């Protein structure tokens, strides 16, 4: 998301799901919506039924890739080389939107100079995608009346994740496929409230609404509202807090509804960090790997037990409503208030709607949002005032950067932090399957879902299976430089030769014991999407 | 010119409508209810059930409202004696091959066929003849199919093939033997079904029902609470169906801006975790290497004391919080506020980056 913020202004999807049926060319990148976002896929299928063309960039032959006009079967972590190559083709053929580039962007010359280094031959070599497919993808997307890029965590969960999303912004900007309905860039969000959690500022460098903590004006506003001096010093990211804990320099953490000891990459290090803390509080609805390290465990309330709002991937703020009483009597918002109050800072709200009113008063993009309005409609931010209808399409005339221009970023292909070698010859890609969710703490409690998908499966291409003399249903050991797990094999043509795939929903075969410590240097997002592994029967 | 409104009348009342609207669309906007069984807004109009027939002036035969486009000057009559007689006949025919076991049927109170039979005063006695006697298909964890209750409206088949594009079921057989079925009549498994339950959500009778909610309460006994799904970031809305303080079922919200009533396996069937016996039910404190249950007061006092001590000893740079993309906006805002006002640093982050 930081990538889109740099290029366009805001770290958010530019358009709306409801606009998808009117797309002429879908460019789906690093996303498998039929599994990970089934309802998004229903919108895309509507477009396909109406005749939309489909370009899919994915190392796996997903449902969408099987039906694509062009499948760009790139090697994992070669996104930037591929997109630079596509842009280079567009510029060589003169397919770019010159008027849009002139009027609404800056930095084009640097981009042009950079992508020239990515001629078809070079890109074929790096990505493994055929030149013809690259040219056809370039043509379909650039020449579409309405082309939309839909991307997922296959773009961001790399050590160059931020740059990957900037590359995607470059492509949209070169073609002028942004700022109109059914165009733009839709980044699909993995978790229900990723967007809202980013928006509301539990972030080390920003107050709610992406207001920088280095801005004296912003600090003054929050100091006035909250009556306490605001530290002007940028805080630590979660990974940094854990690193410092390992070094003995970080002492206390309050963890709300997260399970870093299972879902973070390289979980050995995380567990060591948590054990080094003097005081760890974890609030969750279930015992997790993380609660095992806590000094105090607090019961959380599920989404059915409290009032509040979530903001979805298209910036839509929607209500959740209390259907049953919190199991342990208190919802998280009440607990946070009590901790603050007991530590000498009184925090009192009688209902979450009052918290939203405070959010609206301090956060311009949420300025017009209130529970009263949400009873009648859901609103997409920016919604600055009480009479503002919300925003379905961003950047219709200006980008939210200084000067209102979008910025091209000249980017280099770097590749994965860890590449296969003779010892660890396979690339492990991790991701979601439709039936389960994240650490599995919710879906694994559904007997029906467990009946359908009881265990982790290693997806491996038939060619590799023959080479390794393994067959469907065999148990194998998958190991990386960091760990080893035992899983059952599913032989499939979905994964390409040389790549294998695991989900991360099963603690007894935890793929994050294998994934690498490499991360995006800007956001700290871990490289879940590529690491080197070996596979053996014993 | 393209958006020129057409003028029609419905039951003598004037209505303005767009060029591409059907009589059913126009009637809905005008607040006139026309009965339907094979219609679902998520699907292309089908014209199969013949219940939405209406009379149009100067047209010699009744027309299905769902597939007939409006024309300028059209005069539509939705409740004439003749169309009511025809509808009644259609319903009588449907009930003639229907178990009519509303007493025990899961759909009672939420059944299109039942409501219309009630409204039109129809029973299944008039055209006694051969009836289906097909076995109930209870072969998977989520979806039960009772073919004998099927009215062959085709909604399940159309939503599965046209909207979800899963291709799980198709109308198989001809005439009296036709019935929606999986290929080769195989049980539903992940090989052939996504278990999204869209077929259940569109079924107008009790033929397709959610297995998990069966027997847990009639539609009118549930408190329906509209909410937003807590799994992925799409933001689907649905209704939690609550009875006796328990969520017993999830049903579609057809007005939802994001999903129009469609859901996935997790949203529709993945709610067991709410009442799981493994939920943490009380605060727990680690005492001498053992975890023991505590009261809220004990736990919160301890938290306040220990964080205060660590802050005093090591300073604000040594304490922080992780917030969660699973929690609400309001809670994320409060965590941000807690760290900035009480911990007095910006050491706050969330899994949004992970």
Image: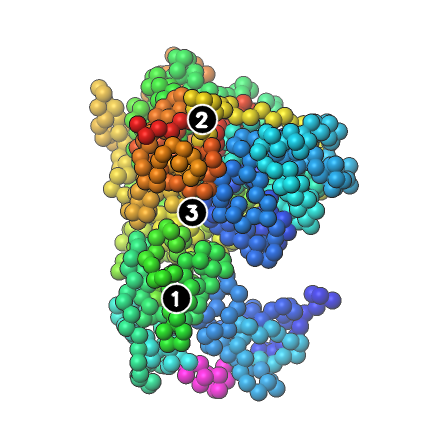
Q: Position of residue A230 (x, y in %)?
A: 52, 22
Q: Which of disc 3 and disc 1 is earlier in sequence?
A: 1
Does the magenta run of residues contain B183?
A: no
Let me know if marks 1 and 3 both belong to one chain.
yes
* Residue labelled with disc 1: B180
Q: Is residue A480 left or right of residue A525?
A: left
Q: Position of residue B183 (x, y in %)?
A: 38, 61
* Residue labelled with disc 3: B229
- Res A425 label: 2
Q: Is residue A466 visible?
A: yes
Q: Is residue B112 left or right of residue A121?
A: left
The C terminus of chain A - image quarter: top left
Q: Is residue A190 visible?
A: no
Q: Position of residue B277 (x, y in %)?
A: 24, 42
Calculate the distance from the C-alpha at mark 1 to the C-alpha at mark 3: 30 Å
Mark 3: which secondary structure?
Answer: loop
Front position in the image: B224 or A79: A79
């Amino acid at each position: 998301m930081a990538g889109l913020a740099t290029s366009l202004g805001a770290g958010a999807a530019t358009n709306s799901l409801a606009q998808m049926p009117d797309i002429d060319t879908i460019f789906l990148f690093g996303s498998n919506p039929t599994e990970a976002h089934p309802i998004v896929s229903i919108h895309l299928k509507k477009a396909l039924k109406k005749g939309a063309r489909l370009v899919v960039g994915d190392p796996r032959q997903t449902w969408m890739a099987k039906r694509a006009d062009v499948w760009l079967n790139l090697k994992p972590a070669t996104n930037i080389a591929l997109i630079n190559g596509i842009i280079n083709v567009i510029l060589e053929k003169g397919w770019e939107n010159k008027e849009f580039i002139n009027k609404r962007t800056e930095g084009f010359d640097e981009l042009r100079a950079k992508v020239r280094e990515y001629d078809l031959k070079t890109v074929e070599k790096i990505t493994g995608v055929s030149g013809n497919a690259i040219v056809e993808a370039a043509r379909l997307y650039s020449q579409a009346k309405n082309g939309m890029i839909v991307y997922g965590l296959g773009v961001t969960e790399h050590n160059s994740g931020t740059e990957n999303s900037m590359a995607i912004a470059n492509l949209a900007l070169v073609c002028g496929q942004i700022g109109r309905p059914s165009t733009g860039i839709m980044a699909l969000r993995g978790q229900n409230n990723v967007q809202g959690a980013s928006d509301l500022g539990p972030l080390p460098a920003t107050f709610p609404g992406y207001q920088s903590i280095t801005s004296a004006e912003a600090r003054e506003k929050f100091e006035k509202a909250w009556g306490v001096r605001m530290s002007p010093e940028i805080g630590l990211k979660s990974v940094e807090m854990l690193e410092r804990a390992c070094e003995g320099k970080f002492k206390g953490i309050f963890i709300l509804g997260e399970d870093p000891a299972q879902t973070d990459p390289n979980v050995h290090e995380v567990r060591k960090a948590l054990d080094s803390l003097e005081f760890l509080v974890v609030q969750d609805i279930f015992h997790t790997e993380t609660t095992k390290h806590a000094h105090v465990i607090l019961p959380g309330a599920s989404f059915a037990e409290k009032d509040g709002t979530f903001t979805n991937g298209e910036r839509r703020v929607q209500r959740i409503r209390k259907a049953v009483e919190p199991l342990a009597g208190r919802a998280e918002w009440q607990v946070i208030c009590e901790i603050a109050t007991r530590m000498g800072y009184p925090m009192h709200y009688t209902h979450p709607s009052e918290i939203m009113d405070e959010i609206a008063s301090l956060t311009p993009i949420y300025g017009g949002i209130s529970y009263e309005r949400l009873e009648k409609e859901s609103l997409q931010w920016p919604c600055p005032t009480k009479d503002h209808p919300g925003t379905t399409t961003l950047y219709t005339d200006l980008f939210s950067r200084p000067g209102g221009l979008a910025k091209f970023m000249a980017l280099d292909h770097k590749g994965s932090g860890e590449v296969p070698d003779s010892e660890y010859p396979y690339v492990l890609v991790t991701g979601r399957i439709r039936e389960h969710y994240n650490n599995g703490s919710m879906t694994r409690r559904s007997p029906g879902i467990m009946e359908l998908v009881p265990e982790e499966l290693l997806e491996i291409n038939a060619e590799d299976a023959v080479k390794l003399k393994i067959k469907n249903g065999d148990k194998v050991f998958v190991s990386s430089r960091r760990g080893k797990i035992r899983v059952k094999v599913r032989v499939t043509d979905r994964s390409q030769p040389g790549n294998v795939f695991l989900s991360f929903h099963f603690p007894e075969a935890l793929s994050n014991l294998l994934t690498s410590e490499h991360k995006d240097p800007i956001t700290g997002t871990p490289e879940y999407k590529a690491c080197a592994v070996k596979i053996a029967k014993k | 010119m393209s958006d020129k409104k057409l003028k029609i009348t419905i039951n003598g009342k004037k209505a303005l409508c767009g060029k591409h609207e059907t009589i059913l669309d126009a009637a809905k906007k005008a607040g006139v209810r026309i009965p339907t069984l094979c219609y679902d807004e998520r699907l292309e109009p089908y014209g199969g059930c013949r219940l939405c027939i209406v009379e149009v002036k100067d047209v010699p035969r009744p027309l299905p409202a769902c597939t007939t486009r409006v024309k300028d000057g059209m005069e539509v009559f939705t409740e004439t004696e003749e169309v009511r007689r025809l509808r009644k006949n259609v319903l009588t025919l449907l009930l003639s091959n229907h178990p009519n076991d509303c007493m025990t049927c899961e759909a009672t109170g939420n059944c299109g066929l039942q409501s219309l039979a009630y409204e039109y005063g129809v029973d299944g006695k008039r055209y006694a003849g051969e009836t289906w006697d097909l076995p109930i298909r209870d072969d998977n964890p989520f979806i039960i199919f009772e073919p004998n209750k099927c009215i062959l409206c085709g909604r399940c088949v159309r939503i599965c093939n046209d909207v979800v594009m899963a291709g799980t079921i198709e109308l198989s057989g001809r005439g009296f033997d036709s019935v929606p079925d999986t290929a080769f009549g195989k049980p539903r498994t992940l090989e052939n079904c996504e278990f999204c339950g869209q077929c259940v959500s569109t079924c107008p009778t009790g033929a397709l029902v959610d297995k998990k909610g069966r027997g847990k309460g009639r539609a009118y006994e549930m408190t329906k609470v509209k909410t937003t799904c807590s799994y992925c970031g799409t933001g689907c809305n649905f209704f939690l169906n609550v009875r006796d303080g328990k969520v017993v079922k999830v049903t579609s919200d057809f007005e939802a801006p994001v999903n129009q009533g469609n859901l996935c396996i997790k949203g529709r069937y993945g709610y067991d975790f709410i009442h799981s016996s493994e939920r943490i039910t009380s605060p727990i404190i680690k005492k001498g290497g053992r975890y023991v249950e505590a009261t809220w007061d004990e736990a919160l006092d301890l938290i306040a004391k220990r964080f205060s001590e660590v802050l005093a000893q090591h300073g604000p740079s040594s304490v922080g919080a992780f917030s969660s993309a699973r929690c609400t906006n309001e809670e994320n805002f409060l965590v941000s506020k807690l760290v900035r006002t009480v911990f007095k640093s910006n050491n706050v982050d969330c899994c949004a980056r992970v």
